[in-house]
Amino acid sequence: MLDFSEESKRLVSTFLTYRNDIDIYTEDESKDKEFYKFLFKKILNKTISINDVTPLGCKDNVIKRCIEEPSNGRKKLFIVDGDINIIPGLDIPILPNLFVLDAYCIENLLLDEETIVNFIYHNCATKPIEEIEMELDFQTWLKPYSESLVKLFLHLALVDLFGGIFRLQNANRFHKIVKGSLEFDPDIVEQETNRIKQEILNDDTEEDFDYNLAELESQWSCDTRSLLTIVSGKDYLIPILLIKAQLFKKSKSLPSLEEIKLSLAHFGRL
């Protein structure tokens, strides 16, 4: 399981092998460019000069560019998300100049207790940070999410393992409105998990399913560390953070995903 400070060290170590200046290619869109530039400059702490960051869209685009990019003397690094493949640890591409994150996506690297507390503090702006930390009760807050969503993502990994296709949903779907606020409902997650299991069993044996699920469960416990590593930061963890932040802020206004990512990168300890 991922230690986020260790993952940033791994990334820095990769950068340092290139020395001097470098061109970086990533997933996502042009609107994410400023986030990547800020994040990498913070991680590197001026040890490397970044020529440019070029978002290429999807993961396949980055890998294709990595394979086809001509050698013209410029130093290049291609960075892609770990995605569902990091759960079984299979089919992870290995190419020169390609760096695969040890987390579902780069947004996962932004999320740890200290960063989340600071994010809520600066967005709330009406309570002392110590009070927010106490009210948040980080481990207790994330415990029901860990127990449900890690299991869900293990099942999604099985869909991929058995050759199926899945689509991620926003975490808001697994909440219900209670007294005007969104409240997590693990029963909705369980229903989705059971639906996925049944889809797999339509084409594969229960023996194969149980064996492969047990293998994944031996690698990933239903705890906070697994939650912050293998559950999509973009589609699940950041929406969960926003729901919690709104309770502190007592406001219905929501920042954009780009604003959130830049704020988390700013407050983070990477």
Image (tube, rainbow, N blue to C red):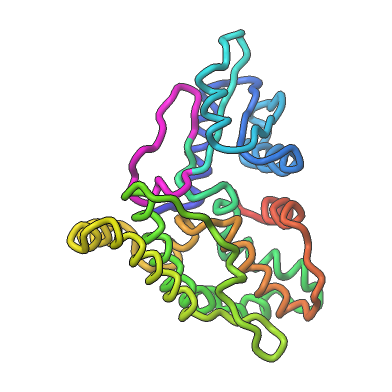
- Most extreme residue toward the bottom, as rendered? 179
Q: Is residue 209 above or below residue 100?
A: below
Q: In which quarter of the view is residue 178 placed?
A: bottom right
176 with respect to 82 (left or right): right
Q: In which quarter of the view is residue 1 placed?
A: bottom left
Q: Is residue 73 above or below residue 128?
A: above
Residue 36 falls inside the magenta stretch: no
Q: As rendered, which of 10 and 72 lies closer to the eye?
A: 72
Q: Which residues are magenta?
A: 82-99
Residue 93 falls inside the magenta stretch: yes
216 with respect to 59 (left or right): left
Q: Measured from the top left, where is residue 268 in percent x and y?
A: 64, 54
Which residue is rendered at x = 57% and y = 23% of the image? 65
Q: Measured from the top left, where is residue 250 in percent x and y?
A: 78, 81
- Most extreme residue toward the left, as rendered? 207
Q: Measured from the top left, where is residue 168 in percent x and y?
A: 53, 57
Q: Measured from the top left, where is residue 96 in percent x and y?
A: 45, 22
146 with respect to 243 (left or right): left
Which residue is rendered at x = 70% and y = 72% of the image? 245
Q: As rendered, which of 169 and 222 lies closer to the eye?
A: 169
- Most extreme residue toward the top, as rendered? 72
Which residue is rendered at x = 59% and y = 71% of the image? 173
Q: In which quarter of the view is residue 33 placed?
A: top right
Which residue is rendered at x = 62% and y = 41% of the image? 43
Magenta region's main secondary structure?
loop
**What count of labels does the image hold?**
0
